[in-house]
Image (cartoon, rainbow, N blue to C red):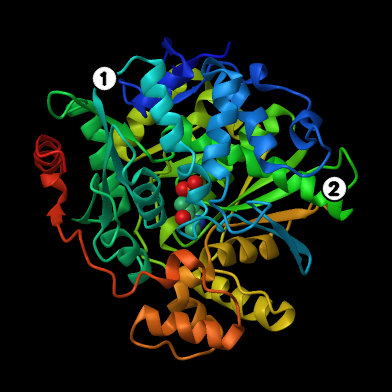
Amino acid sequence: MIQYISTRNSEHKVRSAKAILDGQAPDGGLYIPENLDALKLDYHDVINSPSGAYDFRHMAKVVWNVFFPDYGKDAIDELVDKSYLNKFSKDEITPITKVGDYYVLELYHGPTAAFKDVALSALPNLLTKARELCDFSDETLILTATSGDTGSAALCGFSDVPGTRIIVFYPEGGVSETQKLQMVTAAGANTCAAAVRGNFDDAQTGVKSLFRSIPKPCEGVSLSSANSINIGRLVPQIVYYFAAYRQLLDMGAIKDGDKLDFTVPTGNFGDIMAGYFAMKMGLPVNKLICASNSNDVLTEFLQTGHYDRRRTFFKTTSPSMDILVSSNLERLLYYICGEENTRKYMQELSEKGEYQISSEELGLIREVFCGIASTDDEGSKSIGATYSEYHYLMDTHTAIAWACADKNEDKSGCPNVILSTASPYKFCRAVLAALGEEPEASDEANMNKCHELTGAEIPAGLAGIFGREIKHKDVIDCDEMKDYVVAKSEGRI
Ligand SMILES: *Cc1c(COP(=O)(O)O)cnc(C)c1O
């Protein structure tokens, strides 16, 4: 049965339920499956359901069983059904569409119109079961730093889930008006959202340090995480790589066994890390293309092996990718560089703000990954061109991936799947500008204008947010986060 270890201490071993419950390892590392070889299976067993039909939930069940064996098959059947039945507006859950030379995998048909829903529909169920499996009586307080989309998806997923409370920290001024409204109007008696005076990295660093300083902020309450540092958030994302493969087979776009490239708009390196796990499980993948916006720290790293967060932080029109410390990279580093070097690099990153891996290590990473960056302007041109050529409307994050795919000089000839991570309606202002239209004053007007212009459907989860009561108004400094969390947990939100 696979065990989870910390990326900073392989002696620390836990079952999957415990890894999900903790969110992050006590030493500050991230939980990962001890051994990649143990994940290997025949991918046909994932993509082919008993009835033969395309079945996302079947794929999820097979993948979850590999990663969460201690839950037991019956529990997993139940949890997967609970996570995906009647929650997404498309039967495929993650449908794929051919657009020009690419295949766009739409991950945003969940309740908050972001790809985070795929994982955050699942995590509360996984966590609730983990509490039971680990005989855990404390309430679980979920702390989450968000660059915009995790916040609303997590608030929605955990809303009124028994035994849980959730606090979301988002960067003040760092999210779109729509994203902010989704968070500050979140329902549920157990939810809380606060703006932090700082950027996403400040919020994430703050949250990570709270796991170490106040793992139990008060008697009867323990912390966990809904960020992609939680392995329970990452694993559900592996499934759609298989779902993409199966859909391309059904479309006749590939033959069985053909390899695919995936282009992934990347921030915290969680989504693309899920692709790496899919590949290690045996899915035929050629390259994982890591697309970044102007915050191109990963592009430099994947090209030179030098990770350097000491650079200008840009606020872009793809805010969910405005990240300089990509947490999940630590998971990849462990598998490539081993425990000792990973610990050393992470220490250098926190003390000096940079590290350099060896050329041998870089070579291994580059066998799979390739890093490309595009600017807001390039993304914007992609939105305009894709709309005028194919009448296909994409959001600003997907557009960065599209622009990076166009720029890729090292084309493999494999079909390229672009992961589409948000509905264009979450970023109407920038999308309208890309279409050459004058944006209106409010996002509500922009949403309507976008709809009138393109006829594209407004997601149900977004249509109702304007005019809802604003419930969460707090704005705090980074150094107040600790006191804030203690006070909220004492008052139970
Ligand atoms: C979170 C997010 C990303 C980045 O995903 P990571 O797993 O953090 O790399 C990209 N696009 C959108 C819209 C997101 O919400």
Q: CA distance from mark 1 to mark 2?
A: 46 Å
The amino acid on which the numbered mark 1 sits, given as a three-letter code, is Ser
Residue in the foreground of this view, choosing between 466 and 230: 466
Looking at the image, residue 381 sits to the left or right of residue 320; the answer is right
Mark 1 and mark 2 lie on one chain; the one further toward the N terminus is 1
In the rendered structure, the answer to whether residue 443 lies left or right of residue 487 reads: right
151 displayed left or right of 450: left
Quadrant position of the C terminus in the picture: top left
What numbered label is drawn on residue 137? 1
Which element type, helix, strand or loop, lies under badge 1? Answer: loop
Q: Which amino acid type is marked by label 2?
A: Leu
**Is 405 left, or right, of 114 in this rendering?**
right
Mark 1 touching mark 2, by CB under 8 A? Answer: no
Per the image, label 2 sits on a secondary structure element best described as helix
- The image shows residue 230 at horizontal and vertical percentages of 42, 33
Instruction: Return the residue at label 2.
Output: 249
